[in-house]
Amino acid sequence: MSGPRPRAFAARVLDWFDRHGRHDLPWQHPRTPYRVWLAEVMLQQTQVATAIPYFERFVARFPDLPTLAAAPLDDVLALWSGLGYYSRARNLHRAALLCVERHGGELPKDFEALLALPGIGRSTAGAIAAQAFGLRHAILDGNVKRVLARHRGVTDDLSQAPVLARLWDIAESLLPERRLADHTQAMMDLGATVCLPRAPRCADCPIARDCIAHRDGLVDAIPATRRRAGRPTRTAYWLLLIDDLGRVQLERRPPSGIWGGLWAPPAFDDRALLGRAAADAGARALDDLAPFGHAFTHFRLEVRPVRARVERPVRVGDPHTGWFAPDEALALGLPAPVRTLLRELAEPANPECDPADGRTPPGGSERTGDPTCHEPSTAAASAARPKRSTSRRGPARSGSASSPRSASPPGTSGSRTRRC
Ligand code: SF4
């Protein structure tokens, strides 16, 4: 394999890192395996600046792995609320439980054992191994892929398996003998601060002298962009049932899938289904609120919220459905648009308020920071364990419209709940 001598490459990268790298990230002080792992999982689809406040709240509430394992998943999801990609939080919790069960409450040092944990892929395992244990393993996150592809002039589609295998070979060939933790952080920092997706700062780059993309004018062509089909739009009608105490009815979504395990209003594929469910629940007038959009990787969700007041809430025997006062609801694990919507309902409209929440009017442009679920970076998550309102009134109804377990999968025409 041609390219610069690994030792020279690593020396230049480390020298640059010593002078320009990031040395004050919260997970670096102290750099324990647990904190490195948590940071790596948060950073899988989130930028550093966004992840930092979440990381700090998370370690304040769950300072070590056994504490995380012992916590209810609801608490973990509540603290993750707003960060998006909720499967990361569920996997984190499952992995913590497995570490308690199999590894004495600590992350394993063995690379294969790390890889066997939920939510830990090859690059994350490499980052943990190198940063937490100083082991000689490479990483290949999105930033590092871009750096190496440009440096070696790889013009192919980086999502193709043979191309990825080649990049892994390159990454491993460039590992230094020592300072693995610093090398790993240096490669990440290089991608995040110098070899930027657009307008990279080649004049400041420590590896510019043998960068093929820089030499051959290929910087803008690498990484090769995949042509993406237009994102389809799906519509969901959210029923915001509110009782005479101001409580809102929410359902916990199924544990897997988008927004899995989070709380949200009942959702429907069409307005007529929502109307029937509202009537079943004893609602009279329906109030259509302003629709908004929410972007996912493969589709755009258009949400049409409908508010309905009920005087005597239907009693629900399902533990995954409940009535919550505004402060109780906001302490739950909520998808960001639900959190924003509930805040707006709790606080009368303020024309000076800027929602800045990732929601847009239909036809508007969404945030593009998160490739699967465009969650806001600013939604505060409460560490409080949510309290369920227990004072439910009225007769129980079996098979009432309130049961989330009767929901159909997303996209099922005519189903009462869309799993988006
Ligand atoms: S020289 Fe430019 S394109 Fe090449 S690795 Fe450095 S920043 Fe990236």
Image (tube, rainbow, N blue to C red):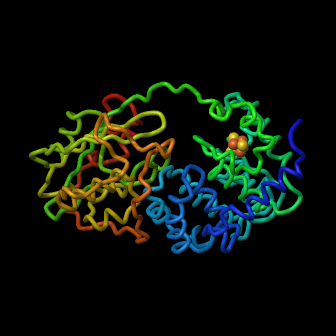
Q: Position of residue 219 (x, y in %)?
A: 66, 35
Q: Position of residue 241 (x, y in %)?
A: 21, 52
Q: Position of residue 152 (x, y in %)?
A: 78, 36
When the figure is inspected, residue 336 is found, relative to residue 68, above or below; the finding is above
Q: Position of residue 233 (x, y in %)?
A: 37, 31
When the figure is inspected, residue 235 is found, relative to residue 79, above or below; the finding is above
Q: Quadrant of the C terminus?
A: top left
Which quarter is ligand 1 in? top right
Seen at 53% across and 50% down, the residue is 87
Viewer-closest of 375 and 223: 223
Viewer-closest of 6 and 60: 6
Q: Quadrant of the N terminus?
A: top right
Tell me: 19 left or right of 264: right
| Residue 145 appears in the picture as rendered | no
The single residue placed furthest to the left in the displayed view is: 285
Where is residue 4, by image quadrant? Answer: top right
Tell me: 184 left or right of 194: right
The single residue placed furthest to the front in the displayed view is: 203
Seen at 66% across and 73% down, the residue is 29
